[in-house]
Image: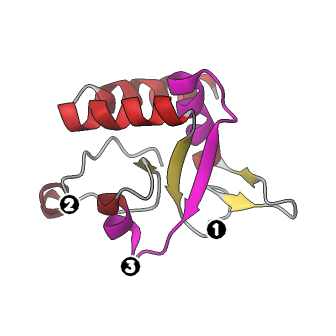
Amino acid sequence: MQRSINMAVAALAAWAGFAPARAATLENMRQRSQLIFGVSQGFAGLLAPDSRGEYSGLDADYRRAVAAAVLGDATKLRFFGLTAQNRFTALQAGYFDVLFRNSTQTFQRGNTVDLLQLPVNF
C-alpha cells in the first residue's frame, strides 16, 4: 500500500509540474479544497461503491493518496461518474480534475485530447 501511495504522489508531482495549465489546475484544486476525480460507474476491485455509497478498491486508494498529497486530507475528494463515451469530453470541459479510469493510452489520444498520460497502475 505504501508503495502505491508513493507512486501516486510521484505521478501527481510529475503531472502538476508538466505545464502551466496543469499548475493552474493544481491551484484550482487547492483553492476549492477538494479534488474531483472522473470515475467509472463501478469496476469491482478497482472502484465500486458499497451500500453506503463509499468507494473502495485500488483506484479509490490512489485517489485518496492524491488527495492526501495535494490537500493533506485523504477525505477531501469527490467522485464524478463517467461512461466510456463521455470521459474525455467531460475532462476537456473541466467537470473534474483528474481521470483515474480504465482508459487505453494512445499517442493520438494524448495529442488530440491534450492529455498527460501517467504510467499504468494495473
The kind of residue tagged 3 is: Gln
Task: Name the quarter where the N terminus is drawn.
Answer: top right
Image location (x, y in percent) of residue 81: 56, 66
Q: Distance between the residues labelled 2 and 1?
A: 24 Å
Q: How far apart are marks 1 and 3 (CA)?
A: 15 Å
In primary-sequence order, the first of circles 1 and 3 is: 1
The residue tagged with tag 2: helix, strand or loop? loop
Residue under the point 22% across and 38% down: 21
103 vs 1: above or below: below
- Numbered label attached to residue 9: none
Query: Mark 2 — residue?
Result: 113
Task: Please tell me which residue lies in front, 22 or 5.
Answer: 22
The number of numbered discs placed on residues in the rendered structure image is 3
Most distant residue in the right direction: 51
Image check: 1 left or right of 98? right
Most distant residue in the bottom direction: 85
The kind of residue tagged 1 is: Gly
Q: Give the range drawn in magenta.
A: 62-90
Q: Is residue 107 visible?
A: yes
| Residue 72 belongs to the span the image colors magenta | yes
Q: Is residue 19 visible?
A: no
The kind of residue tagged 2 is: Val
The residue tagged with tag 3: helix, strand or loop? loop
Contact, mark 3 vs mark 2 (Cβ under 8 Å): no
11 vs 56: above or below: above
Instruction: Characterize the local packing of mark 3: few (<14), some (14-19) or many (20 or more) Cα atoms within 10 angstroms.
Output: few
In primary-sequence order, the first of circles 3 and 2 is: 3
Mark 2 or 1: the one toward you:
2
- Numbered label attached to residue 42: 1
